[in-house]
Image: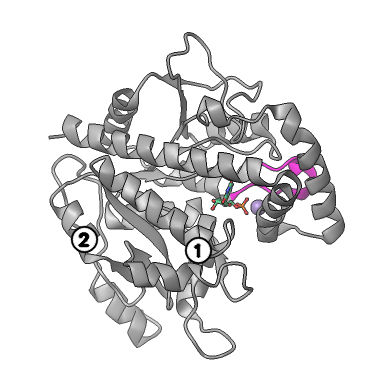
Amino acid sequence: PWACRACRAAAGTRRRLHTPATSTRSISTDSRFFHVSEEVRQAIAERRPVVALESTIYTHGFPYPANLSLASRLESLVRINGGVPATIGILDGVARVGMGAEELIRLVSSAGQPGLLKVSRRDLGFVCGLTGADGKALNGGTTVSATMILAHMAGIRVFATGGLGGVHRGAEQSMDVSADLTELGRTPVAVISSGCKSFLDIPKTLEYLETQGVAVATFADGREGAVDFPAFWSRDSGVASPMVVRCETEAARVIHAHTSLGLQSGLHFANPIPAQHSIPQQDMEAAIYEALNKATSAGATGAASTPYILAKIKELTGDRSVVANRALVEANVIRGTRVAVALRTLES
Ligand code: PSU
Ligand code: MN
């Protein structure tokens, strides 16, 4: 039934391994299109806490070489906090879970160039199966959706990043809903991020996540009662989070129960930006308004929309939002690693 030799070869190397704590977890071994680094493979086999990191943030968010320094900083933060980092992306037509320093440099050094793709679920077959105009295999940064898929294939359950895609403002006209949300509905990985940016429609995003059956909670950080679902640069969004967790151990308990029940949907734990870096909503609103108008007049729709809007906001707000962006990603990676460590303790 397989169309070509490569497909047969890939299928032949794929097998299911069952692990005691999560019997439904399937681990894909290497194929022509999928590679798990030696370090990550070993960490997973030894059941050490592994934290997945995405790469669209480097290929379509930060310029080179700032993206490289951020990538190595995030990997160090995972290690310092007792975890093993698994940066995920597509290099030479191969989906990679865990990349060495040289591979990372090759992936992120062409940030902003048109040949470097932004890869969500729908794009995986194209970026791995086809070659560029020059006949060379393709590279791409994986979004939250594609990173979740590849992390899950490798047997990784915790993934930390900056922000989530969402339902765009005016989605009732454009139907622009990020594939991150449907992925969270069908792939059992816990994503730790600072919520979604307020150029998106946050109430609609939370509604959509509910429909998809995604477990959504916000870290309370000592606050009592209801807390807001965070809006990336701002701790508050004016929209209450559906659930609250007090600490990393509570998040790990939720993941453990969720997985033990055999649920195949994902989880999202929102970590509000550290207070000293939080930018009030009203300070961002003017820049967001202008960026959205520019995106409309430039015709930036579909997959190009989010990177375009982000770049414009950065242009308009300068250092302040970039510093905040770095600070929140770092905080999320530390939180995510602590969740992975707590999960490991819980399941040992
Ligand atoms: N939001 C951010 N920073 C980002 C992204 C979103 O604040 O870098 C990236 C992530 O990779 C996310 C993707 O998965 O954009 C969502 O793109 P879209 O809206 O086209 O689904
Ligand atoms: Mn979109």
Answer with mark 1 or mark 2, whichever residue precedes in sequence.
Answer: 2
Pinpoint residue 341: horizontal percent, then vertical percent: 24, 36
- Indicate the amino acid at tag 1: Gly
Q: Secondary structure at mark 1?
A: strand
Q: Secondary structure at mark 2?
A: helix
Q: Nearer the viewer, residue 81 or 184?
A: 81
Q: Which quadrant holds residue 59?
A: bottom right
- Indicate the amino acid at tag 2: Glu
Q: Nearer the viewer, residue 218 or 234?
A: 234
Q: Is residue 170 magenta?
A: yes
Q: Residue, x 55% and y 72% (percent of image)?
A: 110
Mark 1 Cα-neighbour bin, 10 Å: few <14, some 14–19, many ≥20: many
Q: Nearer the viewer, residue 85 or 227?
A: 85
Q: Which quadrant holds residue 42?
A: bottom left
Q: Along the horizontal axis of the image, is 95 left or right of 270?
A: left
Outermost residue on the front side: it is: 319
**Coloration of the structure image:** one colour
Checking the image for residue 141, the label placed there is: 1
Please report the bounds of the magenta region as a residue range.
167-178
Q: Is mark 1 within 8 Å of ligand 1?
A: yes
**Can see residue 191?**
no
For the residues labelled 1 and 2, the Cα–Cα distance comes to 21 Å
Q: Which residue is mark 2?
A: 39
